[in-house]
Amino acid sequence: MGRDAGRLSLILLLAPFALWIGLLILLPQIGIGYVSLREKVGFNQYEYGFANYAAFFGEPIYRNTLLRTAWISVLVTVLALVLGFPVAYYIAKIARERSRAALFLMCLIPLWVSDLVRAYGWIVLLRETGVISTALVNIGLIAQPVEMLYNDVTVVMGLVYTVILFMIVPLVSTLQGMDDALMEAGYNLGGSRFTVFRRIVVPYAMPGIVSGCIITFMLAAGSYLTPILLGGKNSSWFTEQIYNQFITRYNWEAGATFGVLLLGFTSLVVWAGLKLTGQSLATTVAKE
């Protein structure tokens, strides 16, 4: 009876998670993959094959947009790591115990509003008649208002602001587990601050670095609102191509193909990053 009760408890605990994974992740992905293999040849008539994938690779603008999205997402990930690591190190190793909660709260504040509101906040700041341009004119640094929106720099700024918290959290979690005696031993052996950072802190924090990079890269590559609102027509994003195929052109087959390719390409980039750093999902994301 005790063993049966334990099994029933385990099933009841795992059932919501299994349903969430199966119904909201696995089944939609399988459906998208199925639709991507269809080619419409007539009214409610389809053939199955890889024609949609061949059409994608035969169109340079689609390939270039995917590569451009991946490149900017990598840049956003690197900037989030460079900016987020000092913040995470300060929270984990320097800040007092009582102030850590307040610092975490400050990092969480941007998540209290939606992506749409945050994007429009950047628009208010950076548009031609926005706060920054008006202030520069008033103090005499520029002669006339300047449009700071609708370029790649603005998109990168908006994405870094959106994803940096997801870099800070795993870094803090990893760095908090590092014994201060390791750094003290490094200093006692004659190591400089840079040497201790390179030889002790970075290797210890590598699981947090890799997990943070995976999360921020996937979020940046899959973002839609921020690139569209801040980049406009001058900054094409692959998720915009997916949206256009599904909603504007009503071409669900091509849209599903683009979605599968985006998932596959970003997964390939993550796999390459894990191989280059010698990490695995079991020691990074799963550990967190």
Image (cartoon, rainbow, N blue to C red):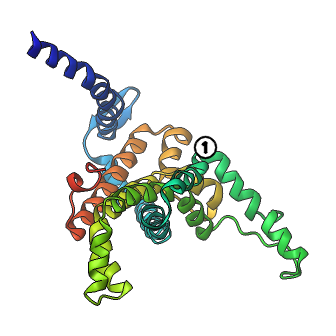
Please give left or right for residue 184 compared with residue 224 in the image.
left
- Residue 141 seen in the current view: yes
Residue displayed at 39% across by 60% down: 171
The residue nearer to you, when weighing 88 against 136, is: 88
Q: Where is residue 71 in the image (x, y as percent from the top left)?
A: 43, 68
Q: Where is residue 128 in the image (x, y as percent from the top left)?
A: 80, 66
User: What amino acid is found at the position of numbered circle 1 in the picture?
Assistant: Trp
- Residue 58 seen in the current view: no
* Quarter the N terminus occupies: top left
Among the 4 quarters of the image, the one containing residue 230: bottom right
161 to 183, vertically: above or below: above
Q: Where is residue 286 in the image (x, y as percent from the top left)?
A: 26, 48
Among the 4 quarters of the image, the one containing residue 85: bottom left
Per the image, the residue denoted by label 1 is 112
State the SS at label 1. helix
Q: Position of residue 55 (x, y in %)?
A: 36, 53
Please give left or right for residue 171 compared with residue 13 in the image.
right
253 to 107, vertically: above or below: above
Please give left or right for residue 225 compared with residue 196 in the image.
right
252 to 66, vertically: above or below: above
The residue nearer to you, when weighing 26 against 137, is: 137
Count of marks placed on residues: 1
Residue displayed at 31% across by 76% down: 183
Disc 1 packing (10 Å; few <14; some 14–19; many ≥20): few
Residue displayed at 84% across by 81% down: 142
129 to 193, vertically: above or below: above
